[in-house]
Amino acid sequence: MPKETPDQTALLFEAVLALETPEECRAFFQDLCTVAELRAMAQRLEVAQLLDDGLIYNDILQRTGASSATISRVNRALQYGADGYKTVLPRLKR
């Protein structure tokens, strides 16, 4: 499989930023991703919200069905990542 180039990634980000409504976003991601990929991303975002709200791993596991590996990965991203979750989570609370 060929490696992803920075231009491909930049094009993807530009495409996402070009979307204007939730409906456009939904349609784009339905075309772009498999159902499993969308569910996984949605689950990670929910896990991030719950971690940000102070819930513990066991409670998150029960509420979301996420594996402990997924919860740990999201927690690492919250603590040491690129601050993507930290940017979006407060905006979702508005």
Image (cartoon, grey):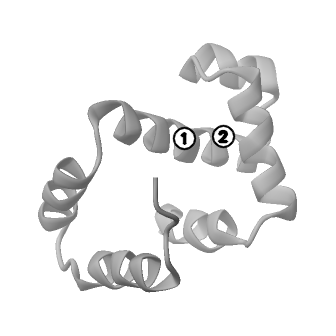
- Relative to 59, 7 lies left or right: left
| Viewer-closest of 28 and 56 | 28
Q: Residue at x 61, y 23 (%)?
A: 66
Element assignment for label 1? helix
Q: Residue 85, image x and y in percent?
A: 64, 63
Residue 14 occupies which quadrant of the picture?
bottom left
Q: Residue 7, image x and y in percent?
A: 43, 86
Say above or below: 35 vs 86.
Answer: above
Label 2, label 1: how many angstroms apart (C-alpha)? Answer: 6 Å
Say above or below: 88 vs 64.
Answer: below
Residue 60 occupies which quadrant of the picture?
top right
Numbered label attached to residue 50: 2
What amino acid is labelled 2 in the image? Leu
Alpha-carbon neighbours of circle 2 within 10 Å: few (<14), some, or many (≥20)? some
Element assignment for label 2? helix
Q: Residue at x 36, y 30 (%)?
A: 36
Q: Among all residues in the image, which is located at the extreme front?
A: 1
What amino acid is labelled 1 in the image? Glu
Numbered label attached to residue 78: none
Q: Which residue is mark 1?
A: 46
Alpha-carbon neighbours of circle 1 within 10 Å: few (<14), some, or many (≥20)? some
Say above or below: 71 vs 63.
Answer: below
Say above or below: 85 vs 8.
Answer: above
- Relative to 39, 23 lies left or right: left
Whether the residues at callouts 2 and 1 have beta carbons within 8 Å, the answer is yes
Q: Residue 56, image x and y in percent?
A: 82, 29
Q: Residue at x 45, y 76 (%)?
A: 9
The total of numbered circles placed on residues is 2
Q: Residue at x 31, y 75 (%)?
A: 16
